Image: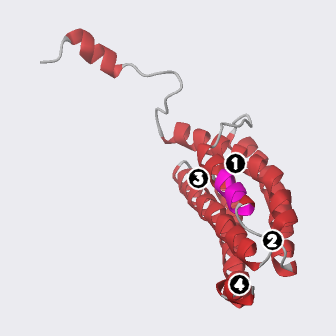
């Protein structure tokens, strides 16, 4: 049987714990804000390591888009009355570490390009999940302007993911599949 002291302790919350959906929304915004900033510093390395001109263009477009998304997130913070701040995004850090590993373990060419696309799509899928969730939170909270801004970013990420699939399937993946044979 729980003592009264244990029940009282269980009812206490840490000041950093999310108490409601609004808190989760704020934490999520800070997380993706950090993720986008970190990503904008990593994309140039991916561009440098890509060999396909089509992939290089897509990654450069992704970099420009990411910079616009950081700015848009600042608008979301303002619309929701939240001070823009970052919270370390462990997920993005892990995805980008994996991306570095792929680039370090492959020779420049179609195999590395296929790996870069895979890493890029993992990032895109994370962003789609994060922005989809934040969009739903904003709508539920009645934050219509924030919801509209988040929906724009969500749509951009879905399109970028589809573009990477098209680039992979139109040449890079088939070339990577036969790379060993060509040696």
Segment colored magenta: 96-103
Q: How far apart are the two marked residues, 4 and 3, measured between alpha carbons?
A: 41 Å
- For the residues carrying marks 1 and 4, which lies nearer the camera in this image? 4
Which quadrant: the N terminus? top left
- For the residues carrying marks 2 and 3, which lies nearer the camera in this image? 2
17 left or right of 172 in image: left
In which quadrant of the rendered view does residue 57 lie?
bottom right
- What is the number of the mark on residue 108? 2
- What is the number of the mark on residue 35? 1
Q: Position of residue 2 (x, y in %)?
A: 17, 17
Q: How far apart are the two marked residues, 4 and 2, measured between alpha carbons?
A: 11 Å
Q: Earlier in the sequence, mark 2 or mark 1?
A: 1
Residues packed near mark 3 inside 10 Å, few (<14), some (14 to 19) or many (20 plus): many
| Residue carrying label 3 | 134
**Mark 1 residue element:** helix
Residue sitting nearer the eye, 142 or 33: 33
**Mark 4 residue element:** helix
| Residue carrying label 4 | 179
In which quadrant of the rendered view does residue 84 lie?
top right
Which quadrant: the C terminus? bottom right
Magenta region includes residue 131: no
Q: Earlier in the sequence, mark 2 or mark 3?
A: 2
- For the residues carrying marks 4 and 3, which lies nearer the camera in this image? 4
Callout 2–callout 1 Cβ contact below 8 Å: no
Callout 1–callout 3 Cβ contact below 8 Å: no
Q: Earlier in the sequence, mark 4 or mark 2?
A: 2
Residue sitting nearer the eye, 90 or 106: 106
- For the residues carrying marks 1 and 3, which lies nearer the camera in this image? 1
Q: Earlier in the sequence, mark 1 or mark 3?
A: 1
């Amino acid at each position: 049987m729980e003592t009264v002291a244990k029940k009282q302790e269980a009812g206490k919350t840490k000041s950093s714990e999310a108490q409601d959906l609004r808190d989760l929304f704020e934490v999520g915004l800070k997380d993706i804000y950090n993720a986008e900033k970190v990503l904008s510093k990593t994309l140039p390395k991916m561009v440098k390591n890509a060999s396909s001109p089509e992939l290089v263009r897509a990654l450069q477009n992704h970099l420009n888009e990411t910079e616009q998304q950081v700015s848009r997130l600042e608008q979301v913070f303002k619309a929701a009355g939240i001070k823009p701040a970052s919270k370390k995004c462990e997920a993005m850090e892990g995805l980008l570490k994996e991306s570095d590993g792929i680039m370090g373990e492959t020779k420049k060419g179609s195999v590395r390009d296929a790996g870069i696309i895979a890493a890029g799509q993992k990032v895109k899928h994370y962003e789609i999940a994060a922005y989809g969730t934040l969009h739903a939170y904003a709508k539920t909270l009645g934050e219509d302007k924030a919801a509209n801004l988040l929906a724009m970013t969500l749509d951009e990420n879905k399109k970028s993911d589809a573009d990477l699939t098209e680039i992979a399937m139109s040449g890079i993946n088939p070339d990577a599949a036969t790379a060993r044979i060509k040696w």
